[in-house]
Image (cartoon, rainbow, N blue to C red):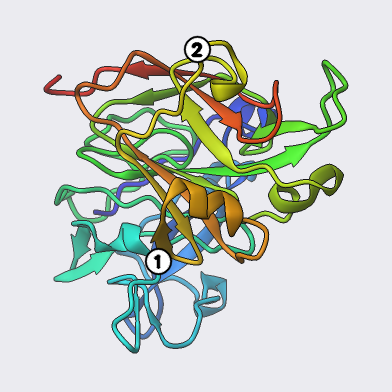
Amino acid sequence: MSHYIGSNPADVNAGFIKRYFYGLRRNEDGELFLVRVDQLAGGDANSITINDLGISEENFLDFEEGIDYLDGIDENKNVVYPNLRYPQLRWDGRSLTYYVEPSTGHFVQAVSEKVTFENNISSPAYGEGTDEEVIIPGNTGGPGTGFNFFTMTVGVDTVGGQASGVFYVNGIERPELSITKGRTYVFDQSASSNASYNVSHHPLMFSTVYDGEHAVNGDHYNTGVIYKLDGVQVTMAQYVSGFVAATTRRVELALESTAPDTLYYWCHFHTGQGNKINISAGSGY
C-alpha cells in the first residue's frame, strides 16, 4: 500500500482539489503517521514512498488526544468519525485511512477494499495510475464504496448578485457536480458561513428538480440521505431547526442503483444557491 499519486497542478490551481494531499509516512521509530504533501511543490517533494523512513518532524501529528483514528471512535467508544467505521486499507496488520478534521475541512477518504501493493513503490509527480493503484483526494473515490467529501460554504454570488449568496463546493462557486452510484458522499456544512451568511442560515437539501421545493412541483429527495448535527443523526426538520446551534453539520448521500441520473443541491430557505448533480452508473450497475 505504498503507491500514492498527486493531482494535476491545473486542477489544484483551479480549486477543484485541495492543494495539500495527505498520505502515510513511517518515522524513525517505525510508527505510521499522516504526512502533508504540497502538490504544487513538484519533483520528489510530491511523492511518498511509505516503506522508507520519514523524518519525524515532517509527519502530520495534529491528532486530537483521546481519539482512535483507526476506528473513528473516542475513549468512550462513541463514534466520532463514522466514515472510519467502514473497511479500510491495511498496512502491517493495522487499519489505515484518512480522517476529516472539522475545523479546517482537511479530509481523508476511506476505501472499502483491501488493496496490496508491491513494497517500495512510489508514484512520480503527477504520474498516471488506476483506481486500483492510487488514492486521489477530492471527488474521486478509490476502489469499492468509499466516502467522498465536499466542503460546503456560502459566499458572494459573482454571477447573479443575489444578497443571500450561493453555495461554494470545495471553494468553487456553485459548481455542477459529477458523482457515481454505489458510493456515499459527505457534504460538510460545518463552516460558519453556512449558518451566518447575510444574517441567515443555509441548510443543504437535494431534489430531482432545480431549486427543490422553491420550484413548481418541486420536492425533497431523501432516498439514502442522512442528516447529522454534532455527529448525531437527525431528521430533516431537526437538521433545519438545530442548524445554527450545532458545531458540525453534514449531509450524507448514499447513492443506490435506483438513484436518478440527475439531482440538484439547493438551500432550504433561498433560491438560486445550488446547481445540478450528474450521476453516473458505478461498477456493477
Residue for badge 1: 25
Does residue 13 appear in this view? Answer: no
Upstream in sequence: badge 1 or badge 2 = 1
Q: In which quarter of the image is residue 154?
A: top right
Residue 184 position within the rendered picture, expressed as x and y whole percent measured from the top left: 32, 40
* Residue nearest the observer in this picture, 269 or 153: 269
Q: Quadrant of residue 159?
A: top right
**Front position among marks 1 and 2:** 2
* Residue nearest the observer in this picture, 184 or 259: 259
Name the amino acid type tagged 1. Arg
Residue 112 position within the rendered picture, expressed as x and y whole percent measured from the top left: 20, 48
In whole angstroms, how far apart are the C-alphas of marks 1 and 2? 52 Å
| Residue that appears at 59% across and 41% down | 42
Badge 1 density bin: few <14, some 14–19, many ≥20, Cα 10 Å = many
Q: In this view, does 27 lie to the left or right of 8?
A: left
Q: Is mark 1 on a helix, strand or loop?
A: strand
Does residue 51 appear in this view? Answer: yes
Name the amino acid type tagged 2. Asn
* Residue nearest the observer in this picture, 149 or 224: 224
Total marks placed? 2
Quarter of the image with the N terminus is bottom left
| Residue that appears at 35% across and 65% down | 52
Residue for badge 2: 217
Q: Is residue 103 left or right of residue 35?
A: right
Q: In which quarter of the image is residue 278?
A: top left
Residue 31 position within the rendered picture, expressed as x and y whole percent measured from the top left: 34, 80
Quarter of the image with the C terminus is top left
Badge 2 density bin: few <14, some 14–19, many ≥20, Cα 10 Å = few
Q: Is mark 2 on a helix, strand or loop?
A: loop
